[in-house]
Image: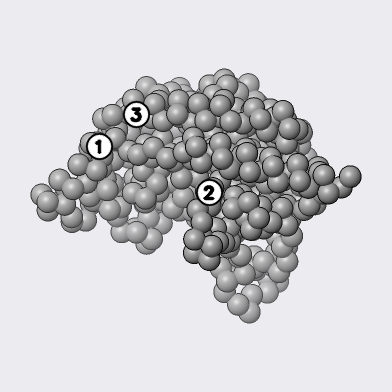
Amino acid sequence: MTMLSPVPIASTIPLSWLHEIFYAAAEEERGTGEQVAKLHVGEPYFNPPPEVGDALVAAVRRGETRYTPVDGLLELRELIVAKLRIANGIDASVSRVFVTPGSCQGLASLLKAIAEPGAEILLPDLHWPVHLQQALLAGLRPVFYPLGPDYRPDLEAVLAAAGPATRVLLLNSPANPSGVVMDAAAVGRLLSAARSRGWRIVSDEAYEHFVFDGEHVSPASLERGLPESERIVHSTFSFSKSMAMTGYRLGYVVTADERTASTLRVVQEANIIGPSTPVQHAGIAAMRCLQAADTHGELVRRNRDAVLPALVAAGLLPELPSGGWYAMLDIARSGLDAETFAARLLRERRVAVVPGTGFALRPGLDGAGAVRSIAPAPWSHRLVRIAFCVGPEVLREGVERLLDFVAECDASHV
């Protein structure tokens, strides 16, 4: 018999290290009056195309501020369907596309829509902490599969971690926080295994336009041509990264089938009634100037190629990340654990990074799904994450200070 938790389940889920460092960096600036090199948060230094802001303002001035359908404006969804077909190889229909207040909210609602009582979700050992929070809030029980030394998913490891209660496999490529990009062969193997075992796949493609080595593969594109009844891939996308619209809060979900779409429509009605109308008009403008996403991708690539090789040369990074906005550094040579390293780097060098422990949490749950214990994987204590989507000078200065700090730590060991 399942025992009820004596406290709200949500109250047992901790905030992520992302928030902790965000506030700590702001406090450091307030306390010292000196600017912090903010390498901890995925905030781009470039802006959306001007058409996006113009469309938002124009919509407000026209009085386009009333409710829209729960799944969003038809015009925007039609543009999304065209983009998915051309850019992603996904043959979606407007009835399976949902405009959401950011892909984060879309992911949370999608997991609620597909969660079954007692079901398990497979997450990578190294994961975005919000994915874990979303799974727990949806009532899914997380199970973690190990990654290889290059942080790539391995089919055998995934299958070994799965069990009879596994129902969902989450994929994130390009990955946050590792920057790993999965190729079509790897995606195909995982998709085949999931289909044969009756799993669903949730594909988070927020960084689709930031692939520097290889090419982006949407898992749902490999289901093109299959009957809807055989499709298992639900996909989420974001305007935040591709179009630099982080504060607009706009994304979209594409369900594999109409049945899931019907359920998601209920979840969205209960959660949001409908997405922001003026922001959707900004999204329409963004869909009409998607070439800006390629420009943004090139800007981040230049950052990577100009600054991150110094981290490779110092032995802190095995290779340049293939995609995304982030890199995981191995700071074991400093002699410090990740949390001490991040705290001292902020205090002594005014550089904000995120401890790797925040991306490798392992919760212990009770029968009701409440978190009763939580601890990071031991290997995560030697990792920190940096964001390289920030301004070129900020990135260069922050990395130089970080390298100086590591060198100082090295010298103290001699």
Image-quadrant location for residue 260:
top left
Q: CA distance from mark 2 to mark 1?
A: 25 Å
Q: Callout 3: 10 Å neighbours few (<14), some, many (20+)?
A: some
Residue 329, picture quadrant: top right
Outermost residue toward the right in this view: 414
The quarter of the picture where the C terminus appears is: top right
Front-most of 344 and 126? 344
Residue at numbered disc 2: 38
Question: Is residue 130 visible in the rendered structure shown here?
Answer: no
Of discs 2 and 1, which sits in the foreground? 2
| Dot label at residue 323 | none
Amino acid found under the numbered disc labelled 1: Pro
Q: Label 3 near label 1: C-beta < 8 Å?
A: no
Placement of 74 over or under 192, stated as above or below: below
- From the image, state whether disc 2 or disc 3 is nearer to you: 2
Mark 2 element type:
strand
Disc with the residue nearer the chain's start (2 vs 3): 2
Closer to us: 151 or 74: 151
**Which residue in the structure is indicated by mark 1?**
50
The answer to whether any part of residue 247 appears in the image is: yes
What residue does disc 3 label? 292
Name the residue: 78% across, 47% down.
409
Q: Residues within 10 Å of mark 2 (few under 14, many from 20)?
A: many
Label 3 sits on a secondary structure element that is: helix
Q: Residue at x 68, y 70 (%)?
A: 2
Extreme-left residue of the structure: 62
Task: Report, in whole angstroms, how far the alpha carbon at label 2 lies from the one at label 3.
Answer: 24 Å
| Residue sitting at the far bottom | 6
Residue 220 coordinates in the image, percent (x, y): 49, 30
Residue 331 x/y as whole percent: 75, 43
> Residue visible at 39% across and 26% down?
295
Badge 1 crowding class, 10 Å Cα cut-off, few under 14, some 14 to 19, many 20 or more, is few
